[in-house]
Amino acid sequence: MTITFNEEQTKGTDKIAKYNWISHDQPGLQMMIPKGDLTVDPSYQRTVHATDLKVKRIASEWSWIACGSIIVADRDGEFFVIDGQHRVLAARKRSDISRLPCIVFASVSPQREAEGFLRANRNRKPMKTIDAFKGMLVAGDPIAQKVLHFAERAGRHVGDGGGSTVISCVAAVIRIIETDEDIANRIWPLVVSVCQGQSLHGELMTGLFELERTADGQSITDPAFAAKILRIGYFGLLDGIAKAKAYHGKSGARVWAIGLANAINHGQRTHKIVLRGEE
């Protein structure tokens, strides 16, 4: 049999050489695997329960076409689901399904699996930041490592929900670290103190960061300003943010910072904090 290449295939080959396109891994093998043999590594996978509404919907309206193939990593003879956890859980609810079609890839390490998990999900559908963070952490992402360090300094852990031991506003923490890590590090102890015993509030943290970043030659870590911030307290600062949002009719880091500055400056005749561009 003679194999010929059409123009597009030739162009594709040329582009690989010309633009140094890479391939992260090798092709997988198609297998039908018993559904009970498929497991999940919670270190990088999103948290999904069998009671999840999406799982119930897939189970009650099962479609083999929609199911397609589960992406699986073969790690020393154990099959770990990289993509398709909802479908696997749904299949387990049905007595008429015993095996699932899978594309199985040889696993080099959980880190490589986590990287594959991120590519599969980021390139196709939105992810909750907390789910992406878990994958980033196992994949060795430096920003995720820094977020984890910030959480440890605060005596908290990254997770869903509120509470005094959790950081759920992980997207906001990532944003301030990426914007200016030095400022983020500088204000973090003050943020932790203000939020002691409360949820770590994303608007409050970001507002303090923005205030520090745009204050005209001043710093909220100055002892006098820091003491005033702690006296105002968590709820007083949030009230300042709420008033600024209502007054300006919009939200955002700049508005939150203005609200915090107004709260700090209230009752002050001198030693007021001023944002650049504000009178």
Image: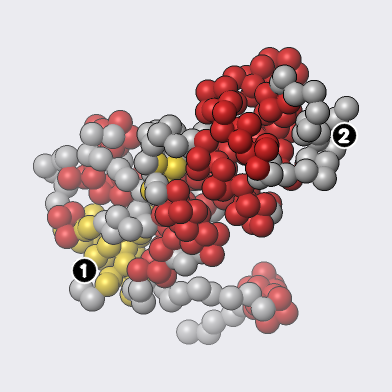
Cα separation, mark 1 vs mark 2, equals 59 Å
Q: Is residue 144 left or right of residue 158?
A: right
Kindly identify the residue that appears in the image at 57 percent across and 28 percent down.
231
Lower sequence index among marks 1 and 2: 1
Query: Amino acid under label 2?
Result: Gly
Which colouring convention does the figure follow?
secondary structure
Of the pair 238 and 69, the residue shown nearer to us:
238
Of the pair 178 and 12, the residue shown nearer to us:
178
The circle drawn on residue 36 is none
Of the pair 259 and 37, the residue shown nearer to us:
259
Question: Is the residue 194 above or below the residue 33 in the image?
Answer: above
Mark 1 neighbour density, 10 Å: few (under 14) some (14–19) many (20 or more): few
Which quadrant does the C terminus fall into?
A: top right
The circle drawn on residue 78 is 1
Res 259 quadrant in image: top right
Question: Is the residue 139 above or below the residue 211 in the image?
Answer: below
Secondary structure beneath dot 2 equals loop
Kindly identify the residue that appears in the image at 61 percent across and 47 percent down.
187
What is the residue that sits farthest to the bottom in this orientation?
A: 2
Dot 2 corresponds to which residue? 277
| Residue 127 % position (x, y) | 48, 45
Query: Amino acid under label 1?
Result: Glu
Secondary structure beneath dot 1 equals strand
Res 266 quadrant in image: top right
| Residue 3 % position (x, y) | 54, 82
Kindly identify the residue that appears in the image at 30 percent across and 31 percent down.
53
**1 or 2: mark nearer the eye:** 2
Question: Is the residue 54 above or below the residue 42 in the image?
Answer: above
Kindly identify the residue that appears in the image at 80 percent across and 28 percent down.
270
Q: Is residue 25 left or right of residue 87?
A: right
Mark 2 neighbour density, 10 Å: few (under 14) some (14–19) many (20 or more): few
